[in-house]
Image: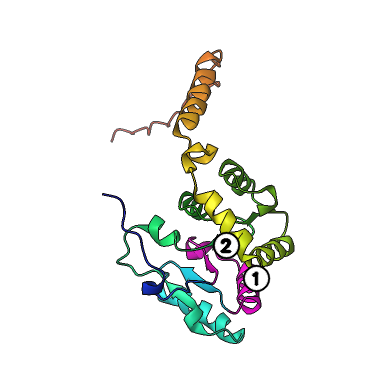
Amino acid sequence: APPRRLDRAALGLPLRAPVLTCAAEPQWLNPKMLQIWMRLLQAIPTAALWLPAWPPSTRQALHEQVHAAGIAPQRLRYMPRELTDPTASLALADLHLAPGDTGGEAALADALAAGIPALACADSGSLALLRDAGQPADHFCPDLSTYEARALTLLRQPRALLALRRRTNDSPSTLALFNIHRHARQLEAVYTELMERPPQPLAHQQPAPTVPTATVTPI
């Protein structure tokens, strides 16, 4: 049976406003990027932030930043633990935010698999994921200031964001990131190259050190 489609309204998410998300584990969160999140929420007063069920300590730290930024805490929504399909939960969002300028590739891959447009910066692993998922070239940002400006542009153009959302969600099997046969061929090529390499001589092994034998003097 097809997976149950989740409903935004039932989960307290806005129907006609952008929903941002980040599926990364808390250890990847970067304070500078969190400040960017706050400024995006300030600039787009209708936007909501849809987050995993992070530990209470992480939620508390995030709510302190929200309070300091003058943002209503109700704009932060957490995925209920009973939602066992993380892809369906992520698919409710419109844009995936990076947890920092490096790291979080697994979360980025999950978001792209859910059909969500994403931005990333600095890390080459993220660049490969975005390229293979068919994301626009300018979604890979060289620095945090470019990242913030690009995110704000997307959020201020809801029609363009919706079009990008639909394009990301349509026919993922045709994209390189989700092409299983392509990945299998690449893996086969690696194994073939390894098998065709001439055998390398083993490094010279040092003889094991000898342990002196204790001399027992007869009484």
Q: Using the numbered discs, state the Cα–Cα distance from disc 1 to disc 2 in whole angstroms.
A: 10 Å
Q: Secondary structure at mark 2?
A: loop
The reply to whether dot 1 and dot 2 touch (C-beta < 8 Å) is yes
Query: Circle 1 is placed at which residue position?
Result: 36
Is 28 within the magenta? Answer: yes
Q: Position of residue 20 (x, y in %)?
A: 54, 67
Q: Position of residue 42 (x, y in %)?
A: 63, 79
Name the residue: 63% across, 59% down: 160
What's the image's color scheme?
rainbow
Side of 10 where 29 appears, left or right: right
Whether residue 58 is situated above or below residue 73 in the rendered picture: above
Is 156 within the magenta? Answer: no
Whether residue 29 is situated above or below residue 175 in the rendered picture: below
Q: Position of residue 18 (x, y in %)?
A: 55, 69
Front residue (pair 91, 71): 91
Side of 12 where 169 appears, left or right: right
Front residue (pair 197, 162): 162
Q: Position of residue 75 (x, y in %)?
A: 50, 79
Please give the range of residues in magenta. 17-45
Q: Earlier in the sequence, mark 1 or mark 2?
A: 1
Q: Is residue 103 visible?
A: no
User: Residue 79 is drawn in which quadrant?
Assistant: bottom left
Mark 1: amino acid: Ile
Name the residue: 57% across, 45% down: 129
Q: Secondary structure at mark 1?
A: helix
Side of 141 where 16 appears, left or right: left
**Exactly how many numbered labels are in the figure?**
2
Mark 2: amino acid: Leu
Whether residue 192 is situated above or below residue 76 in the rendered picture: above
Name the residue: 52% across, 24% down: 190
Query: Circle 2 is placed at which residue position?
Result: 97
